Amino acid sequence: MSVPPPRLALVTFPAPGSSPIRVRFAPSPTGMFHVGSARSTLFNWAVAKQQGGTFVLRIEDTDASRNQPEWVDGILAAMESLGISTEDPAFEGPYFQSKNVELHQESAARLFESGAAYYCDCTREVLVARTGSQHAGYDGFCRDRGLEYAEGRALRFRTPDEGETHVVDLIRGNPTFPNESLEDFVIARGNGTPVFLLANVVDDMDEHITHVIRGEEHLPNTPKQQLLWAALGATPPVWAHLPVLVNEKRQKLSKRRDKVSLESFFEEGYLPAAMVNYLMLLGWSPGNDEEILPFDEMISRFKIEDVNSAPAFFDIKKLTAFNGEYIRALSVPEFTAACDPWLHAPHAPWSEEQFDQKVFDAVAPLAHSRIALLAEITDNVDFLFLDAPITDDDSWNKAMKAGAPELLADVRVALAETGLAWESETLKDTVTAVGEAHGMKLGKAQAPVRVAVTGRRIGLPLFESLEVLGRERTLARIDAALARLTEIATRTAAEAPTGAE
Ligand code: GLU
């Protein structure tokens, strides 16, 4: 049985440069949105917006077994969180690759009819036996056997034996691939379904894509795809292969080893604007030593030709520092609103009854100036809402050294003084004075107080925290800490050897 002749001739495609730029982002739905995909999306978007062009979103969903509708929703949600509105006039799609299967098949048929492709019945075992190698590429055995389509026969593209394929790549300096290094690759499987290489090209043609901006892992596909463009009678696009993202050990980011999903960063409280800013700098720099810039400004300064081809370090520490800057740039009400998800279930370790928005509002300015991640907010304020401070043995052991019980007891007495104004300055003076009486500087004297009251060695400024927590709860917590210290001392004495034996 032979494949039916093409039903329609492919439309003619514009030559790059002759019409407004059309770029695309073409994710395969995989269940999470990789930070590398986010960077590709943003670079494509920047080019489209800056050039008055179009950004096409194409979901490459032909692997039906791996596609789930919610993953498509995840891609659309990722677009929105990156500041790309599907309502923007520059946005087109989403298109679904699976809806274009007929055109992929017709294109395969056309390549067969024109002699650019041929059927092949070599199994892997036969090829290995013939070439004597597990790794050898296809040897062209079926090239001139004139096979027609039959179940199980793959369709292979006939690559030229001589010459070179030149790729116009705006980042890579126009790499050249010797054609003899390109094996006759498969374009449709034995069951007749076209493979990624062909479907991807046909969709790009069909969507009139002028510039393909994508990850470096696709560079080896490019000469093959360019040959397909030419064989289908169209002018290939201009390519730009973005540098790979690596971790601190210079290893390519991997979803098994590294945190790579955009969603997981948002869940930890990275702000979308900080994320977008940081992602834009992975391989590109606006120059003038500037790094933190509004997205619109980056769009107007972005040049794909300036993207560096060297691997880009995805530096979470730097991203976190950026995030801190973006948090600081929020107004306090904006910050409070941004914290909201972390102040309630399922993020918050306290219940709705324990939470008090007014109390939070009182400390929000203190937290605003010191946290780098929104998720850090709960640890900073939990002492205000939980009935008792958390137990952190490490903090306790470091703060409750020799002298701490006596100091804490005296702080308790001083703070309980009737008439003591319960405001941060007075509280600070009081603890300073008690510390001095014990020969301790304030830094040292406040550690046991902080751990007694908040459970932690580090946190918001202590005296402002005590002011908000209130006299009664502060004193009750110091009492509880003193009781625990007495209990530990009693136990230690009982367990200690009674004398030399
Ligand atoms: N679906 C492919 C991927 O996610 C698209 C490759 C391309 O951009 O051409 O890797």
Image (spheres, helix red, strand yellow):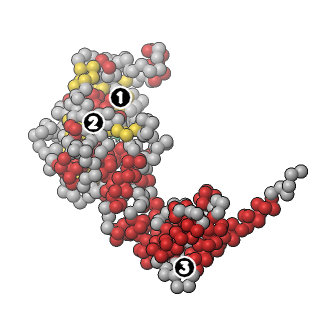
Q: Residue furthest left?
A: 18
Residue neighbourhood size for the residue with mark 1, other residues' Cα within 10 Å, grouped as few (<14), some (14–19), many (≥20): many
Residue that carries the numbered disc 2 in the rendered image = 308
Whichever of labels 1 and 2 marks the residue nearer the N terminus, that label is 1
Camera-side mark, 2 or 3:
3
Work out how far the residue at label 3 is from the one at label 1, CA to CA, in angstroms.
Answer: 77 Å
- Classify mark 2 as within 8 Å of ligand 1 or not, answering yes or no: no
Q: Quadrant of residue 13?
A: top left
Q: Is 23 placed above or below 128 here?
A: below
| Residue 278 percent across, percent down from the top left | 32, 49
Whichever of labels 2 and 3 marks the residue nearer the N terminus, that label is 2
Q: Looking at the image, can residue 96 be seen?
A: no
Residue 471: which disc?
3
- Ligand 1 resides in the quarter of the picture at top left
Q: Is 332 placed above or below 158 here?
A: below
Residue ID at (15%, 47%): 51
Residue ID at (27%, 20%): 179
Residue neighbourhood size for the residue with mark 2, other residues' Cα within 10 Å, grouped as few (<14), some (14–19), many (≥20): some
Q: Nearer the viewer, residue 130 or 212?
A: 212
In which quadrant is the N terminus drawn? top left
Residue that carries the numbered disc 1 in the rendered image = 186
